[in-house]
Image (tube, grey):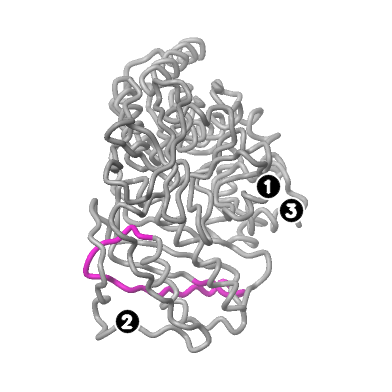
């Protein structure tokens, strides 16, 4: 922990949904959900209008649809649009300091001291206001919440205290006063299982956790996790801002409240985890060759199974099928307390196809209890329109897919610099319709 509030954390507010509302003026002020909109898709981001109904990231899309009223919009992600906005934001941050550590496509840490700035509380407060204004102007109105503190932990938590479009500066000496009243779930490393164990011990706030002896945490969580929680509850965090980080893998996992032995339930959970991993891969512009499934039993014994493809992928369906084959090789008779999916051997391109995994003569068959998935024929060229996709008509100009099905596609013709536009319906294979790049917001 530093002696001055010199670490800033910026988190764009509901980034994917905010960018969609910027580019689609008819959706401004309405609930917007971005993610896998078909089948067992999950929510990647929900606008703040949707969050008032309890919709959140990683929620099954079917549940989001049940919660939201008529008129809500459900859109597929447009990663090119998100990456373009992210590049603008990260470039602006690098003008502030040479030490910028992107955490994801929509958040980053910034070392303000490395930029030669006065790090007194009034000075960094004014600096942050200017940064927020510049980001909103450069991105067409996308806002970000900022936290500034003496450590990454404090800055990260502070950025979440006044969302959206918030600014919280935690001055030196105020770290514990700020952290201790907060729910213990605000700390890194406190997921559902850890939170439940702490709740059983009467620990609900970060202050409650800080009051417990290290020996208790070691007994409950082991050396690494227990020591980490003990330090963080005391705001003991000296990690530097690291400007370049090579992503080794992208993963998602879920800890169950009770052990799960039902393969059907585990299969559905696996599908959602694979979809989350694919979303994160595409957001980062990455793909990977190795799919790994992690399983943990009631006694914390953990096993993994991996398969490596000849070509990298970021396709949810491909990741899901590989993960299901791997899960079929894992004994779940006594139940699992945790299930995870990861993709590694990353690269910045994807080239999908029907490739066998390396080291096997042919892919493993699915378990006998589950029939092999049928491969649907690909849709005719020009008819696989997806809701939210950018589109251009030879006569009407740019717009986006409002809806599609039954051989037709409905398009709303508008953009970030226009008022809400008209809606027209065409045959799905209309030769005047073309895919388009994301619109310019400048």
Q: Which mark identifies residue 349?
A: none
Question: Nearer the observer, disc 2 or disc 3?
Answer: 2
Residue at 49% across, 14% down: 125
* 42 in relation to 5, above or below: below
The image shows residue 185 at horizontal and vertical percentages of: 64, 45
Residue at 36% across, 84% down: 364
Distance in Å between CA atoms under marks 2 and 1: 40 Å
SS class, disc 2:
loop
Distance in Å between CA atoms under marks 3 and 1: 28 Å
**Is residue 339 left or right of 193 when viewed as pictured?**
left
**Is residue 306 left or right of 145 when viewed as pictured?**
left
Residue stretch in magenta: 295-315
The image shows residue 191 at horizontal and vertical percentages of: 60, 53
Circles 2, 3 touching at the beta carbon (< 8 Å): no
Please report whichever mark, 2 or 1, sits nearer to the chain's N-terminal start: 1
**Dot 2 corresponds to which residue?**
363
**Dot 1 corresponds to which residue?**
67
Question: Nearer the observer, disc 2 or disc 1?
Answer: 1
The image shows residue 20 at horizontal and vertical percentages of: 45, 34
Check the image and name the residue furthest to the bottom: 368
Residue 302: within the magenta? yes
**Dot 3 corresponds to which residue?**
199
SS class, disc 3:
helix
Can I make out residue 11 in this image?
Answer: no
Main SS category, magenta section? strand
Please report whichever mark, 2 or 3, sits nearer to the chain's N-terminal start: 3
């Amino acid at each position: 922990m530093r002696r001055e509030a010199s670490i800033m954390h910026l988190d764009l507010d509901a980034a994917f949904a905010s960018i969609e509302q910027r580019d689609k003026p008819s959706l401004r002020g309405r609930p917007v959900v971005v993610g896998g909109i078909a089948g067992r898709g999950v929510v990647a981001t929900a606008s703040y209008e949707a969050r008032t109904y309890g919709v959140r990231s990683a929620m099954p899309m079917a549940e989001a649809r049940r919660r939201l009223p008529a008129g809500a919009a459900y859109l597929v992600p447009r990663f090119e649009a998100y990456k373009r906005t992210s590049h603008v934001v990260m470039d602006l941050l690098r003008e502030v300091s040479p030490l910028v550590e992107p955490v994801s496509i929509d958040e980053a840490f910034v070392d303000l001291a490395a930029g030669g700035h006065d790090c007194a509380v009034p000075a960094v407060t004014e600096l942050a206001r200017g940064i927020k204004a510049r980001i909103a102007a450069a991105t067409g109105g996308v806002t970000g919440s900022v936290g500034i503190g003496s450590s990454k932990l404090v800055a990260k938590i502070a950025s979440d205290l006044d969302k959206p479009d918030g600014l919280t500066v935690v001055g030196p000496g105020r770290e514990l006063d700020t952290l201790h009243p907060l729910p213990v779930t605000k700390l890194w490393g406190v997921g559902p299982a850890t939170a439940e164990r702490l709740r059983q011990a009467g620990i609900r706030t970060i202050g409650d956790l800080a009051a417990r002896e290290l020996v208790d945490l070691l007994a409950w969580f082991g050396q690494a996790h227990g020591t980490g929680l003990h330090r963080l509850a005391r705001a003991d965090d000296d990690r530097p801002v690291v400007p370049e980080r090579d992503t080794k893998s992208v993963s998602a996992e879920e800890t169950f409240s009770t052990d799960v032995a039902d393969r059907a339930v585990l299969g559905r959970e696996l599908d959602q985890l694979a979809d989350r991993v694919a979303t994160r891969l595409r957001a980062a512009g990455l793909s990977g060759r190795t799919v790994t499934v992690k399983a943990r039993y009631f006694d914390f014994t953990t096993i993994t199974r991996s398969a490596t493809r000849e070509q990298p992928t970021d396709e949810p369906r491909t990741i899901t099928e590989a993960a299901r084959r791997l899960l079929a090789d894992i004994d779940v008779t006594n139940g699992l307390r945790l299930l995870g999916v990861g993709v590694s051997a990353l690269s910045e391109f994807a080239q999908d196809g029907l490739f066998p995994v390396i080291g096997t003569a042919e892919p493993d068959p699915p378990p006998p209890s589950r029939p092999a998935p049928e491969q649907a024929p690909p849709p005719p060229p020009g008819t696989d329109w997806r809701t939210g996709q950018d589109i251009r008509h030879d006569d009407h100009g740019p717009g986006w897919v409002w809806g599609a099905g039954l051989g037709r596609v409905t398009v709303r013709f508008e953009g970030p610099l226009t008022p809400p536009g008209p809606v027209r319906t065409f045959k799905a294979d209309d030769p005047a319709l073309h895919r388009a790049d994301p619109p310019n917001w400048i």
